[in-house]
Amino acid sequence: MATLDDVRTTIELARHGYLSTASAEGEPHLQPVVFQVVGDAIYIAIDEKPKTTMRLRRLTNIESNPRFALMVDNYDDDWNRLWWILLRGPASVLWPTEWRVEEAAAAIAALRDKYPQYESMGLEERPLLKLIPDRVTRWSASGSY
């Protein structure tokens, strides 16, 4: 079985993925996300794009059922270029009032380095998702990612 280190470069270069969470009752929820790898974790910011509430389903799901799946893939009409990576494990919601300052600062800096759109957003005042993959599955039509 693969590890995060085995797919780190591909994951770091990927521009987006799909985060799957489930409620305590097992109701699935799938959300497109952007993310960044820092150390052994993957961080997702809850950014300032318009939202109806800060009690987002992905946050409440993780608080009641911390297991996640993150799918990162590449589609191409040349099916020899198809690949996907599925990361699974426990997730947590890091609220600004509960942050370890150094961890949050490193995650936010890494997210801003990857996504310039975050430069003007006040991510320091919003929650972060922290994903710790403990299972990594990958597939590629060509054997390379």
Image (cartoon, rainbow, N blue to C red):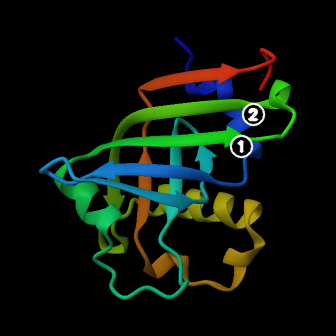
Q: Vertical placement of 56 versus 4: above or below?
A: below
The answer, for residue 102, to whether it is visible in the render is no
Q: Residue furthest top?
A: 1
> Please, what secondary structure does the residue beneath circle 2 have?
helix
- Residue 116's x, y, as percent? 77, 72
Residue depicted at x 40% and y 59% = 100
Residue bearing the label numbered 2:
9
- Mark 2 closeness class: few <14, some 14–19, many ≥20 residues within 10 Å: few
- Residue 87's x, y, as percent? 49, 33
For the residues labelled 2 and 1, say whether their Cβ atoms are less than 8 Å apart. Answer: yes
Q: Amino acid at mark 1?
A: Glu
What is the C-alpha distance between the residues marked 2 and 1?
A: 5 Å
* Quarter of the figure with residue 32: bottom right
- Residue 45's x, y, as percent? 51, 66
> Please, what secondary structure does the residue beneath circle 1 have?
helix
122 relative to 8 in the view: left or right: left
- The answer to which of 30 and 10 lies nearer the viewer is 30
Residue bearing the label numbered 1:
12
* Quarter of the figure with residue 74: top right
Residue depicted at x 67% and y 40% = 73
Q: Quadrant of the C terminus?
A: top right
Q: Vertical placement of 62 versus 126: above or below?
A: above
Q: Residue furthest right?
A: 78
Q: Amino acid at mark 2?
A: Thr
The answer, for residue 110, to whether it is visible in the render is yes
* Quarter of the figure with residue 23: bottom left
Label tally: 2
- Residue 127's x, y, as percent? 40, 70
Residue depicted at x 52% and y 11% = 1
8 relative to 142 in the view: left or right: left
Q: Vertical placement of 95 versus 3: above or below?
A: below
